[in-house]
């Protein structure tokens, strides 16, 4: 199971940039200053791309941690979190 | 530690009931405050954001999008940090004061016709304060209740907090309907008309809630931590810069809360909007269908919270997500086939009695999924993080999951239906794919083992 968890990490790492690309691509296609809908509004897109980019980066970091085996075992207490070797990396 | 165990074991049923009630009522009022703005959006936009003025339109966009997407997570960081440094009790008192105060003041701002652009600017500022306060409230209430609960009842006790978002929606809808029905429309819509009453009523509700909360004591776990000088010096750094904690924040977000947020939003909000705009159901039917379904499903928040104490949190969350992924398209397809498809030329559809109750049953099912993913989530989040950074660490993923992922359901739905106009159900691919992604991550990486103690 741990091997599967680790290899899936690559999928999460690849999904992050794909999400950012998809959002920027959609923004450039749909922004229209003369449009009336929310999807034509540049301010909405700035907010959405701005908030989703760090989330997508978070997904990449999640994938990296998964690949490095950080999720092989989930800690069950604060003491285990303290002892977690990844804490000092 | 033994002092706390003794304290919790000596605490009677009436004490814990008081703690749950004080926390839940305050949180419900915060949701009420947040919802009335959305429910009165049409009147508010006429009074404060008039069409044709580009600056007012920009401020309106910011009020709608920034309050949910940026300010809520930011509020989670600001108040989470405060809650982990100063204490749970005073922090969630502060969020209540800010929310109640800003809601009341929105009801006092003169309209655009009286003070020009200052009106939308003030309303935007107050709306941002509302978003900030909401971002700080939930983590405090959930943490406070969980830190008073014995380990075998943590899911059950915190599930009462989980009912508050739905009850807040009920309260907001009820107060608005009551005010609206007590006066003719000519008295409701003017600049200083009845639409302001729900905002003013908030002051009374918040006043009562503050009084109740002032009489509560600090969480025993936090008080113990503080008395021994073990509180976190910098909860933000400890939560997000220490890899061992940060990886749990990411796991909470991508393995649970992201899916929970979209299931919650799709069941409670998107379904009603779909019935009204795509199925063309009449205004009253689309709302009463939702009200009946919510009334029937609300006790299940508590049932699934209770059940999670027995079987663990993970598989209840995952089952709710799996059912959502598998049944969203058939359920929404049924709505279409039995409404507008039967009479494509109609502008408004009124369902016959039998079909009306079938629709209620299906919306009930959608909200049942919400209760499965939302009922146990507070206990799940509380158990992931240690006491010293719990408020900060659980608040951020919660508000990103619900505010950002959930709040984007209508926007991405519009985006998809503009790109693929041939499929009326295309908007569902966003909640389905986010939930499916969360389901895969949750099944792979989450652990079903219940944390026996949150006293660490």
Image (cartoon, rainbow, N blue to C red):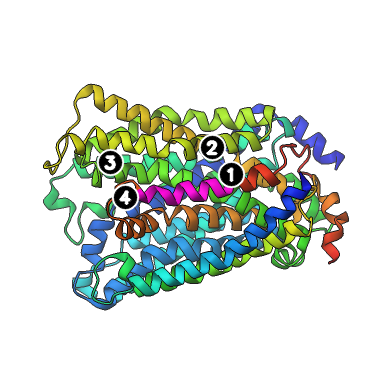
Quick one: label 2 or label 1, which is nearer the N terminus? 2
CB contact under 8 Å: marks 3 and 1: no
x then y, percent, for residue A54? 58, 68
Q: Is there a contact, CB below 8 Å, between mark 2 and mark 1?
A: yes
Label 3: state its secondary structure.
Answer: helix
Find the distance from the CA under tag 2 to the CA under tag 3.
23 Å
Q: Distance from label 1 to label 4 (Cα)?
A: 39 Å
- Classify B302 as above or below B76: above
Give the Cα separation between the discs numbered 3 and 1: 27 Å
- The quadrant holding residue B330 is top left
Q: Earlier in the sequence, mark 2 or mark 3?
A: 3
In the displayed structure, B110 sits above or below A78; it is below
For mark 4, name the chain.
Answer: B
Q: Which residue is mark 4?
A: B198
Left or right, B373 with reference to B147: left
Circles 4 and 3, Cβ within 8 Å, touching? The answer is no
**Residue that carries the numbered disc 2 in the rendered image:** B322
Can residue B207 be seen at all in this image of the molecule? no
Q: Are marks 2 and 3 on the same chain?
A: yes
Q: Earlier in the sequence, mark 4 or mark 3?
A: 4
The local crowd at label 2, few if under 14, some if 14 to 19, many if 20 or more residues have their Cα within 10 Å, is some
SS assignment at label 2? helix
Q: Which quadrant does the N terminus of chain A fall into?
A: top right
Label 1 vs label 4, nearer the camera = 1
């Amino acid at each position: 199971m741990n091997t599967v968890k680790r290899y899936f990490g690559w999928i999460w790492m690849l999904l992050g940039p794909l999400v950012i690309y998809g959002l920027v691509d959609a923004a450039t296609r749909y922004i229209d200053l003369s449009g009336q809908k929310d999807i034509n509004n540049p301010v909405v897109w700035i907010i959405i791309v701005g908030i989703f980019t760090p989330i997508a980066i978070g997904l990449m970091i999640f994938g990296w941690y998964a690949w490095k085996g950080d999720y092989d075992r989930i800690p069950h207490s604060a003491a285990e979190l303290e002892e977690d070797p990844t804490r000092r990396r | 530690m033994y002092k706390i165990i003794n304290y919790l074991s000596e605490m009677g049923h009436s004490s814990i009931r008081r703690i749950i009630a004080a926390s839940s009522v305050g949180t419900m009022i915060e949701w009420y405050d947040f919802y009335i703005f959305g429910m009165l959006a049409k009147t508010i936009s006429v009074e404060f954001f008039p069409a044709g003025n580009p600056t007012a339109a920009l401020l309106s966009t910011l009020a709608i999008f920034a309050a949910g997407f940026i300010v809520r997570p930011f509020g989670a960081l600001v108040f989470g940090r405060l809650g982990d440094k100063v204490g749970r009790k005073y922090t969630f008192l502060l969020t209540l004061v800010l929310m109640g105060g800003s809601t009341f003041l929105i009801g006092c701002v003169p309209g655009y016709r009286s003070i020009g652009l200052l009106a939308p600017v003030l309303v935007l500022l107050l709306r941002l304060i509302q978003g900030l306060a909401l971002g700080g409230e939930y983590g405090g209430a959930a943490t406070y209740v969980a830190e008073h609960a014995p380990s075998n009842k943590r899911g059950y006790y915190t599930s009462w907090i989980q009912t508050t978002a739905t009850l807040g929606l009920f309260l907001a809808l009820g107060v608005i309907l009551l005010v609206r029905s007590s006066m003719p429309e000519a008295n409701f819509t003017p600049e200083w008309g009845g639409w302001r009453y729900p905002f003013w009523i908030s002051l009374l509700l918040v006043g009562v809630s503050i009084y109740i909360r002032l009489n509560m004591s600090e969480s025993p776990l936090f008080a113990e931590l503080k008395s021994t000088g073990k509180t976190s010096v910098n909860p933000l750094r400890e939560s997000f810069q220490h890899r061992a904690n940060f990886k749990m924040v990411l796991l909470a977000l991508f393995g649970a809360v992201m899916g929970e947020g979209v299931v919650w939003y799709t069941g409670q909000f998107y379904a009603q909007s779909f019935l009204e705009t795509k199925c063309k159901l009449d205004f009253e039917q689309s709302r009463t269908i939702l009200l009946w379904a919510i009334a029937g499903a609300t006790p299940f928040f508590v049932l699934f919270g209770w059940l999670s104490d027995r079987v663990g949190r993970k598989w209840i969350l995952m089952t709710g997500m799996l059912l959502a992924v598998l049944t969203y398209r058939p359920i929404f397809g049924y709505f279409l086939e039995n409404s507008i498809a039967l009479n494509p030329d109609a502008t408004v559809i009124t369902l016959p009695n039998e079909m009306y109750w079938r629709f209620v049953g299906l919306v009930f099912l959608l909200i049942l999924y919400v209760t499965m993913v939302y009922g146990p989530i507070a206990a799940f989040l509380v158990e992931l993080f240690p006491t010293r950074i719990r408020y900060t660490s659980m608040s951020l993923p919660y508000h990103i999951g619900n505010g950002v992922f959930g709040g984007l359901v209508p926007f991405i739905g519009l985006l998809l239906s503009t790109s693929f106009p041939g499929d009326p159900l295309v908007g569902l691919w966003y909640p389905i794919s986010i939930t499916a992604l969360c389901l895969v991550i949750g099944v792979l990486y989450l652990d079903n083992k219940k944390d026996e103690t949150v006293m660490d």
